[in-house]
Amino acid sequence: MSKKRTGIHLVEANLLLQLGIPPQRTANLRPYCGWAWFPSREGLFLEASKLELHSEYNVQWHTQPGIRYTKHGESIICELLFWHQNKMKLLEDVDFLRNWSPGTFV
């Protein structure tokens, strides 16, 4: 997320600093960004929910239809990186995502 916002890859910059090499890039603020992950729920995962955000986004799914989850299992269903030039639009998406369910479980 920090790379999307500033253009700086923090892990890469950290490694360069540890090697005594100063990073060449300077921060250049880009769109406002958010990152979220969504845990599994108990039951059989049937299908993914559609996302309708103001922001552009990349979603990485870690499941597929037909996977069964238990209440004791720990699993992430999906990860989401989203960004928008307008901070208020991004915050509207954050509010939407607070109640969004990543999929249908039975």
Image (tube, grey):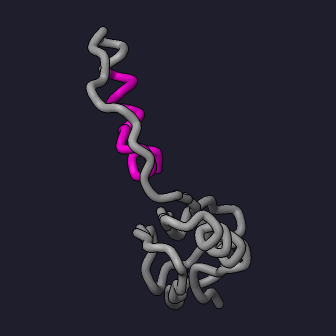
Q: Position of residue 48 (x, y in %)?
A: 50, 85
Taking the spot 54% from the left edge, 81% from the top edge, the residue there is 53
Taking the spot 47% from the left edge, 85% from the top edge, the residue there is 66
Taking the spot 51% from the left edge, 88% from the top edge, the residue there is 50
106 vs 16, nearest the viewer: 16
For the question of whether residue 86 can be seen, the reply is yes
Q: Is residue 25 left or right of residue 79?
A: left
Please name the predominant secondary structure of the magenta segment in the image.
Answer: helix
The answer to which quarter of the image holds residue 45 is bottom right
Q: Is residue 7 above or below residue 68?
A: above
Does the magenta-highlighted stretch encompass residue 53? no
Q: Position of residue 77 (x, y in %)?
A: 53, 70
State the count of labels.
Answer: 0
Q: Quadrant of the C terminus?
A: bottom right
Q: Position of residue 64 (x, y in %)?
A: 43, 80
41 vs 20, nearest the viewer: 20
Q: Position of residue 44 (x, y in %)?
A: 58, 84
Does the magenta-highlighted stretch encompass residue 7? yes
Q: Is residue 70 left or right of residue 32?
A: right
Taking the spot 26% from the left edge, 26% from the top edge, the residue there is 24
Specify start and end residues of the magenta stretch as a single range: 1-15
40 vs 82, nearest the viewer: 82
The answer to which quarter of the image holds residue 99 is bottom right
For the question of whether residue 42 can be seen, the reply is no
46 vs 51, nearest the viewer: 51
Q: Is residue 84 above or below residue 17?
A: below
Q: Is residue 6 above or below residue 56?
A: above
